[in-house]
Amino acid sequence: MTPPEPRFPVAVTKLKLLDSNDDTEDVSLFDAEEETTNRPRKSKIRHPVASFFHLFFRVSVVVVYLLCEFLSSSFTACMVTIILLLSCDFWAVKNVTGRLMVDLHWWNHIDEDGKSHWVCESRKESSQENKTVSEAESRIFWLGLITCPVLWVIFAFSALFSFRIKWLAVVIMGVVLQGANLYGYIRCKVGSRKNLTSMATSYLGKQFLRQNTGGDQTS
């Protein structure tokens, strides 16, 4: 699967190139964020339409799943409606709301050797006043991104333990589609497992040295 041609309309900074073997291309994360660390974040919602649809599809599919047996007696109609809403949500979050609300975009492609590569991008603005991400939009994005997959996991266990086998396939599709976006954006945000390990090791090393230094000075 080849990456989509249209990306950000402005200059793009690649964050991480990750494959199934956790090989990582060493590139700096969030250059724009490092340049604007000391400047306050904007709390205004600059993309109200994107923010609305980011939550609309996710909330709608949950409501339809919970009430579909009361709204319709046809399992097929309910299943098709849920799958359509899940597909719309997956496409909107992956290709639209992530770019507009948190300046992130991810995709996955398979190279000639059959290895799976995860590619993440971050928008790098040229205008100083547009470099920061809206704090309100960021909270809405991550809240919707994290909460809904957790709900679908709960629905999966509920369907399994209540022996609603016919709904299990629908719920698993919800877990997979919404979980894929969550996984992709988390990889964009925090990087690979190797980077997390090195950050934790560095932090523990600094704390160890600080405690030893403090103890030597005290004695």
Image (cartoon, rainbow, N blue to C red):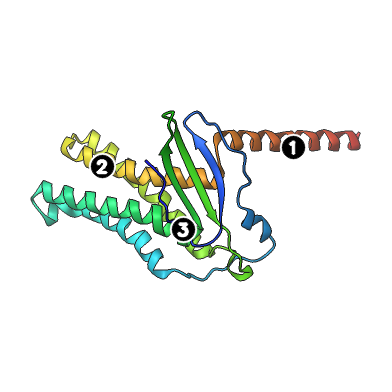
Tell me which residue sits at (32%, 42%) in the image.
175
Closest to the observer: 27 or 172? Answer: 27
Q: Which residue is mark 3?
A: 99
Q: Is residue 180 visible?
A: yes
Q: Are marks 2 and 1 in contact (CB under 8 Å)?
A: no
* Nearest to N terminus: mark 2 or mark 1: 2
Residue 91 on image: x %, y %: 34, 53
Res 6 → quadrant: bottom left
Tell me if residue 84 comes above or below residue 155 in the rendering: below
Res 55 → quadrant: bottom left
The N terminus - image quarter: top left
Residue 23 on image: x %, y %: 55, 31
Q: What is the C-alpha distance between the residues marked 3 and 1?
A: 37 Å
Tell me if residue 141 comes above or below residue 117 in the rendering: below
> Which of labels 3 and 2 is toward the front?
3
Tell me if residue 83 comes above or below residue 219 in the rendering: below
The C terminus - image quarter: top right
* Nearest to N terminus: mark 3 or mark 1: 3
Q: Amino acid at mark 3?
A: Arg
Q: Amino acid at mark 1?
A: Gln
> Which of labels 3 and 1 is toward the front?
3
Q: What is the C-alpha distance between the residues marked 3 and 2?
A: 27 Å
Residue 184: mark in rendering: none
Name the side, left or right, on which 15 lies relative to 47: right
Q: Which residue is mark 1?
A: 207
Name the side, left or right, on which 162 lies relative to 123: left
Mark 1 neighbour class, 10 Å CA radius: few under 14, some 14 to 19, many 20 or more: few
Check disc 1 and report its element: helix, strand or loop: helix
Check disc 3 and report its element: helix, strand or loop: helix
* Nearest to N terminus: mark 3 or mark 2: 3
Mark 2 neighbour class, 10 Å CA radius: few under 14, some 14 to 19, many 20 or more: many
Residue 171: mark in rendering: 2
